[in-house]
Image (cartoon, rainbow, N blue to C red):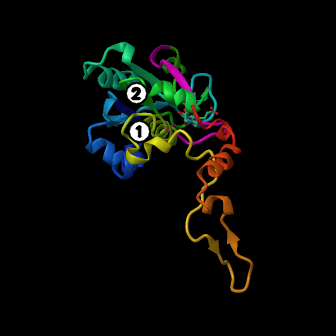
Amino acid sequence: MRFDILTIFPKLIEPYFSDSLFARARAKRLLRIHIHNLRAFAKNRRNKVDDAPFGGGPGMVLQIEPIYRAVRFASSKFQIPDSKKRIILFSTRGKKLNAKTAKRLSKYDQLILICGRYEGVDERVAEHVADEEISIGDYVLSGGELPALVLAETVSRFIPGFLGKSESLEEIKGSYPVYTRPAAFMPKRGARPWNVPRILREGNHAAIKEWRQRYGDGGGLRA
Ligand code: SAH
């Protein structure tokens, strides 16, 4: 799987992909992550990629030309068939991201992620360039960089090998409460301890399973 992320702020996202699970997955060649600075695709001396909106109104709009060129560059450099790549535009009007969508996207060989900024992106990118528009929630962020990190992470967790040893737990982890040592935490001397539920400490695996299942489907966390 390869991610190509198009942004005007590459430095905001590079460090996140250079540590922890992403660093390991990249070293294992499980994932390739390429961050493209949209300004490098601007065709003017000042590397300008935005302009005022037609019809007036506040803010600036990311222009289609540098985005179009960057997408062309990212999608043509590698011999990946069109059916195995997906071009995604982050937008507050997009379809809400969930685990099901992430699992579906994890089947592609290449995801090209377009991060908007300012007042948004020229609508022709949604109309002619992107395959789909995705929102990560009903709130407004300043750009598509955090959505790109969120999407890349949740999609990657569905790629076999990304999670390493803990993988077998992945489908249920997060859907029930977890505790670790100490079994009794004393917030203050003489106060009543905050205890771990006894059932989890007793080692009756059937009972533990039943206790965990009481937390149901994890509120839709499972895909
Ligand atoms: N005026 C726009 C906000 C633009 S925010 C509106 O109200 O819709 C600038 C960019 O940040 C957007 O183009 C989009 O790429 C990204 N963005 C902001 N919030 C987002 C969200 N919840 N999900 C996905 N992308 C988001």
Tell me if residue 89 comes above or below residue 81 in the rendering: below
Q: Position of residue 137 (x, y in %)?
A: 63, 37
Inspect this view and state whether residue 55 appears: yes
Query: Three-letter amino acid code at disc 2?
Result: Ile
Q: Amino acid at mark 1?
A: Ile
Q: In terms of secondary structure, where does tag 2 sit? A: strand
| Front label number (2 vs 1) | 2
Disc 1 element: loop
At which x and y percent is residue 76? Answer: 28, 19
- Image quarter where the C terminus lies is top right
Q: Label 2: which residue?
A: 112
Rendered-image quarter of ligand 1: top right
Q: Quadrant of the N terminus?
A: top left
Q: Is residue 194 above or below residue 71?
A: below
Residue at horizontal 65%, vertical 35%? 220
Say whether disc 2 or disc 1 marks the residue closer to the N-terminus: 1
| Residue that badge 1 annotates | 8
Q: Residues within 10 Å of mark 1 (few under 14, many from 20)?
A: many
Q: CA distance from mark 2 to mark 1?
A: 15 Å
Residues 103 and 176: in front is 176
Q: Which residues are magenta?
A: 128-144
Quadrant position of residue 180: bottom right
* Nearer the observer, 94 or 168: 168
Q: Is residue 11 visible?
A: no
Q: Position of residue 45 (x, y in %)?
A: 30, 34
Measured as percent of width and height from the top left, residue 78 is found at: 25, 22
Classify residue 160 as left or right of residue 80: right
Q: Nearer the viewer, residue 7 or 29?
A: 29
